[in-house]
Image: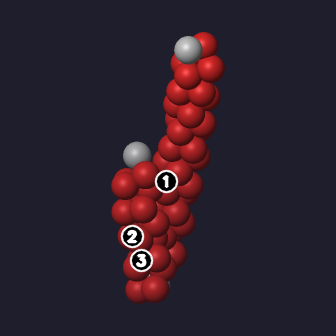
Amino acid sequence: MLKWAIIFAIISLVTGWLGFGGISGVTATIAKILFAIFVILFIIALLAVIGVFHIL
């Protein structure tokens, strides 16, 4: 998930640099959404691991 967010962020930077503002905006939005999903899933996984080790 993080890999795809980074790829879309790089595509957004390149297309913005080349002057394709519409494509750059879309790919930036996709990168933000993917990064947010990654952060949410990471926090859930971190809480699950903490919960498992707290019980032991």
Residue 17 in view: yes
Describe the element under mark 3 as helix, strand or loop.
Answer: helix
| CB contact under 8 Å: marks 1 and 2 | no
Q: Residue furthest top?
A: 55
Where the C terminus falls, by quadrant?
Answer: top right
Would you call the spot at circle 1 few (<14 residues within 10 Å), some (14-19), or many (20 or more)? some
Of residues 47 and 31, the one nearer the viewer is: 47
**Residues under numbered marks 2 and 3 in contact, where contact means CB atoms less than 8 Å apart:** yes
In the picture as drawn, the residue positioned furthest to the bottom comes out as 18
Residue at x-position 42% and y-position 62%: 6
Q: Which residue is mark 1?
A: 30
**Farthest residue toward the front?**
56
SS class of the residue under badge 2? Answer: helix
User: Up-down: is 42 above or below 4?
Assistant: above
For image coordinates 53% across by 39% down, the residue present is 42
Quote the CA–CA distance across marks 2 and 3: 6 Å
Q: Check residue 15 in the rendering and tell me which mark sits there, or answer none.
A: 3
x, y percentage for residue 15?
41, 77
Determine whether the residue tagged by mark 1 lies in a helix, strand or loop: helix
Image side of residue 4 versus residue 51, left or right: left
* Residue annotated with mark 2: 11
What separation in Å lies between label 1 and label 2 (alpha carbons)? 11 Å
Pointer 3 local density, CA inside 10 Å: few below 14, some 14–19, many at least 20: some
Q: Give amino acid for label 3.
A: Thr
What amino acid type should be assigned to the residue bearing mark 2? Answer: Ile
Residue under the image location 37 percent in, 54 percent down = 4
- Tell me where residue 17 appears, x and y as whole percent: 46, 85
Q: Is residue 48 visible?
A: no
